């Protein structure tokens, strides 16, 4: 794994509704003004010879529920930035938080973190008090942490999904640090963990389920999307040049600052090899389905 000492600040917030590009080419969308500089790197107690993201005695886990932390109340009201630190043996993702007034948050409400090891998605479920984000998505460009998406879920709250690079096998831990309050996720390689399949990414749609080989009847497609239209379509085709043989509407909750989670169900999908298109007519994502389905993820941009 490549070595980068310290922290690379991937997000420096600017005025409302601007787009910034850092030196690595990662693009972030800012929707709220910033009043503070990004906080310094997070330090933990532990062996000073270890990388920061391995210090301390907090355990790592390779699947399922990772941790829950925070309090019954907190003053964090918005996500202000996402930063990564890449070191020789591990990677760290830091989520910066602000109050509703734009000051550094002192505490965060209840946060839950779980890891879908098959697809390779770390989901940070944020408390209801966090209602805004200055970052919609980000290329993390780590060897473990590949991308991040802030998602408005079907339940209406915000969540942050960290996508692990396809083929990587990781263990992770997650916790809050204070003064100011930040959410920290540490990742390290784990030779005993299963390798991830990876989600399927298009320009304006991400499909996170079902995993390859786990589809069936009914066929349930899940993920998130960015679209100005309140409803788009999921279509099944005999091939990409043919007319659709099954169409289902996909409701898109409108969100100016985040991706919108979706779920669409084909209750009686055609058997055999078909192609799925989901997204707008001029964009979206094509995915191959075999026998309703047997291979869903691993598609390509339309």
Image: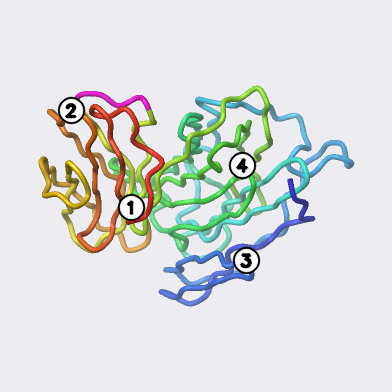
The N terminus lies in which quarter of the figure? top right
Q: Which residues are magenta?
A: 213-218
Q: Quadrant of residue 100?
A: bottom left
What SS does tag 1 mark? strand
Residue 205 is tagged as 1
Q: CA distance from mark 1 to mark 3?
A: 23 Å
Residue 173 in percent (x, y) is at 63, 34
Reading the image, the residue beneath label 2 is 271
Identify the mark nearer the N-term, 1 or 2: 1
Q: Residue at x 42, y 68 (%)?
A: 31
Reading the image, the residue beneath label 4 is 185
Q: Is residue 46 left or right of residue 112?
A: right
What SS does tag 4 mark? strand
Residue 1 is tagged as none
- Residue 278 versus residue 268 in the image, above or below: below
Residue 152 in percent (x, y) is at 34, 49
């Amino acid at each position: 794994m490549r070595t980068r000492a310290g922290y690379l600040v991937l997000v420096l917030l600017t005025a409302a509704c601007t787009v910034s590009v850092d030196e690595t080419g990662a693009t972030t969308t800012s929707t709220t003004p910033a009043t503070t500089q990004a906080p310094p790197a997070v330090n933990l107690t532990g062996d000073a010879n270890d990388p920061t993201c391995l210090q301390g005695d907090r355990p790592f886990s390779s699947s399922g529920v990772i941790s829950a932390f925070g309090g019954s109340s907190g003053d964090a009201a918005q996500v202000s930035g996402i930063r990564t630190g890449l070191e020789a043996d591990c990677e760290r993702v830091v989520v910066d938080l602000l109050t509703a007034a734009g000051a550094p948050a002192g505490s965060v409400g209840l946060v839950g973190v779980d890891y879908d090891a098959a697809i390779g998605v770390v989901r940070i479920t944020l408390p209801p008090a966090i209602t805004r984000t200055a970052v919609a998505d980000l290329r993390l460009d780590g060897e473990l942490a590949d991308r991040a998406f802030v998602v408005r879920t079907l339940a209406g709250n915000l969540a942050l999904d960290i996508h692990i690079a396809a083929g990587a096998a990781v263990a992770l831990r997650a916790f809050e640090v204070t003064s100011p309050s930040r959410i920290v996720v540490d990742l390290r390689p784990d030779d005993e963990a299963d390798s991830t399949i990876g989600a399927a990414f298009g320009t304006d749609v991400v499909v996170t389920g079902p995993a390859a080989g786990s589809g069936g009847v009914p066929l349930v497609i899940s993920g998130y999307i960015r679209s100005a239209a309140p409803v788009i379509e999921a279509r099944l085709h005999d091939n990409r040049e043919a007319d659709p043989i099954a169409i289902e509407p996909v409701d898109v909750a409108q969100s100016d600052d985040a991706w919108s989670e979706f779920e669409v169900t084909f209750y009686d999908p055609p058997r055999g090899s078909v192609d799925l298109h989901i997204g707008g007519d001029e964009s979206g994502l094509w995915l191959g389905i075999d026998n309703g389905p047997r291979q869903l993820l691993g598609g390509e941009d339309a």
